[in-house]
Amino acid sequence: MVRAPAKSCPNLSKLFEDAEPELLAQFLDVKDFQRLDWLKAYRFSANDPEGPSAARDMLLKEKKDRLIPLETEAARIITIASDRGQYALEGLARTSLEDDDAGALLGRRDSLARSLRAYLTEPELFEAAENNLHLRLYRRYDKHYQTFMAEPSDSGGPDAGSALLEELLIDLNKRLKRGDGYRIDKFEIPADDEEPAEDMYLLFHPNPPTSVREIDDDGNRSSIYFRPPGEAMIVYTPETGRVHVRAGNRQLRHTIAERFIETALDQVYSNQPVDFQAYDISRFLRVLDLDTPEFDDVMIDRAKVIRADISIENLANRLSLSTTINQDISKILDSQPGLRRVFERAVAIRFIEIAVRYRRAGRDDLQTLDFTLTDNNTSSLLSLDDPFERVLGHRLLQHWNILREGRAPDDTESLAVMPALLAIWDIAAEKVSGAWLQTRNVDPCLLIDLGFLIPQGWQEGDLIDNEDEVGPVDAEVVVRIDAENAEEGNREVAHLRVADGQEAPAGNPDHFRVYRVRDGWVAQHLQDRLEQVLNVPEIEELTEHLLYLGMLDIDDSEVPVYLARGLDQEKIRSAVDTELRARHNLGIGLVLQAGNALGHSIAANVLTPLADQIDTSKAEITLVADKLRSVFRRHRLLASGGMTVGLHRSGDEFATLVVPGRGTIDIKGKNRIDIIQRLVDAHNNGPMPMMTRDLVKGIAEGQSLSNIFKKPLWDKLKAEFLRSHSSKGPWEIAS
């Protein structure tokens, strides 16, 4: 069968059909194709009249996999030859090239000639146009870009070749530690109908070294070792102060944005998200009808849901219903017996397609806008070519309350979400589930509006701890009708079905939603609010789990105040304990914890939950100083070591050893607690030193104390709380 080049290599085929011979000859001779030995037979000189037709034969003679490199590059050229690509190319050419060079480029006979000429002679300008085109399509799509807030500027960003950009490259080199080879180019993006003028910086950086295996046409294999190039794009909008960053991963985007704002713009970096948005399609579980709003510049003739995908019984099962804009999907549901009930009992709405028939002001023809929304917080609106339709689609979504734009919290909202933020910051998780939020009576809607959470779809399966310690078992969502409420409309209730058929109640389907946490914004908001409340110039981050908040005057003494998180995790609590002991010269402090871990002291400091110290009767966040002082006074003696040696238990698995003059130390684990209890009893009844064999008898016989307590707990005990004349005992409390 004869290959159809227009189907197998459509972009390369268009290039051969429409490109000027001179430019086509240069295209086949570019550096990227020099290692393609087979291509030598098709290269031709620009003045050879038979060259283009002979070269075109490759589309019929060569296999498609050989043509892939040429087709890939041709696709780039065809993209920039489109109307939107030409708009980007022309704007950048006029601001970046000399007048003569811009005229020579833009004066070519057609859009394809201009695109191909830029590709061959102005590669940096061509790449800038590609990046500009990508920016216009995806700048508000969180998976491609992240947007950061800086201050507006009348003079714009730093100029190409400036000392500030050189300093930025040096700074990034030190932070990324990927070797030399950094470069940054600046392009000015002119204003258009949608966006103000912007400064675009293309940052080229080295990626970590790698290698690939290669095989040539003769079957010879070899390895190629190389350092692949990396590229990031920074777009600064002087009028609004917004900085858009596209890079390989989220961490790299934050690093580049932070260094650009602080080094190149000489401003303070903020984690507060801007331009974020969330598409909430949950309303379509209840109703699929859409009203037609009235706009001044466009008449909406018809707006219909033309496709809806739901999950039934469990999230793995998908059911889709599709129709056309001329049909009413609600009537279709009602026309089929039982179909409406199936949709009402759905576990989740997964995908929605909307069609809108509209007429622009001043036009007679009707046009149709078609776009999709998913439960993963994505929309096809962002990839539409027509900017008017992208804007119209988002206006409609806002009218229908599907698109929720982010905003900064006011004092009342900040107070309302503070307990939830403390809990989220305490666990330091990248994602949280609806179940986690429900158990804490947290409504995710406000957290989404304020940018702390981002919807991320659903759990496709849950894991339940098996009570017999066999291991985790798969679970699925199952919807059942609540029989007790049958007369009230058969209210659906979700259950959890585990592998052996047992069912456990699991609340409503929102139990299985998943949300990504903007951890940087959560941490910054907490710090900003606490700085205002405590009246301190700046909070100091001692570790990622411990912050120093400043001093509090208590009984004519300055008491250090800290904020800690993750204290319910033994490893983190031990690290925080170590850090606090290193600051013992500041005296007994007050540690406010984000969570609600056990104990009233840590490392000779008073410990209390921060949430307990917030005055909820106020309209804004207020810490009651007298309440803080009262907590400190109540537990100060215990934190310092008390009056007598003791072991204060909080359940079977947690206790605090108290030694006068030495302070306190947390002991976690039943065996450890039982051993320390024997030492405390021996001290209070004697005192009498005890041999290791007597301490572990009946508890953990055959094990050493260092193995039972592990590092660094054992080292802390030996250094501060226990003593012995030899490494093997006998041991006693050091009081």
Image: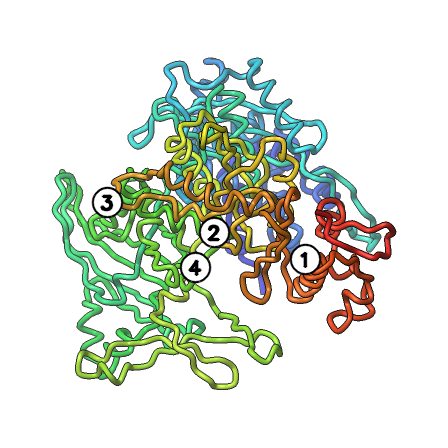
- In primary-sequence order, the first of circles 4 and 2 is 4
Tag 3's secondary structure?
A: helix
Determine which quarter of the picture holds residue 109: top left
User: Could you give the CA–CA distance between mark 4 and mark 2, rounded to whole angstroms?
Assistant: 21 Å
Near-viewer residue (252 or 271): 271
For residue 425, side relative to residue 578 (left or right): left
Which residue shows up at 86% across the image and 50% down it? 725
- In primary-sequence order, the first of circles 4 and 1 is 4
Which numbered dot is residue 107? none
Which numbered dot is residue 595? 2
> Could you classify mark 4 by the number of other residues whose Cα lies within 10 Å: few (under 14), some (14-19), or many (20 or more)?
many
Q: Which residue is mark 4?
A: 514
Q: Is residue 90 visible?
A: no
Please name the amino acid that badge 2 sits on. Answer: Gly
For residue 580, side relative to residue 701 (left or right): left
Near-viewer residue (371 or 408): 408
Q: Is residue 694 visible?
A: yes
Q: Depth-wise, is mark 3 or mark 2 nearer the camera?
A: 2
Which residue shows up at 51% across the image and 52% down it? 427
155 to 21, vertically: above or below: above
Which numbered dot is residue 395? 3
* Number of dots carrying numbers: 4
166 to 497, vertically: above or below: above
The N terminus appears in which quarter of the rendering? bottom right
- In primary-sequence order, the first of circles 2 and 1 is 2
- Residue 265 in the image: x percent, y percent? 48, 20
Determine which quarter of the picture holds residue 86: top left
Q: How is the image coloured?
A: rainbow
123 to 265, vertically: above or below: below
User: Could you give the CA–CA distance between mark 4 and mark 1, rounded to whole angstroms?
Assistant: 53 Å
Please name the amino acid that badge 1 sits on. Answer: Asn
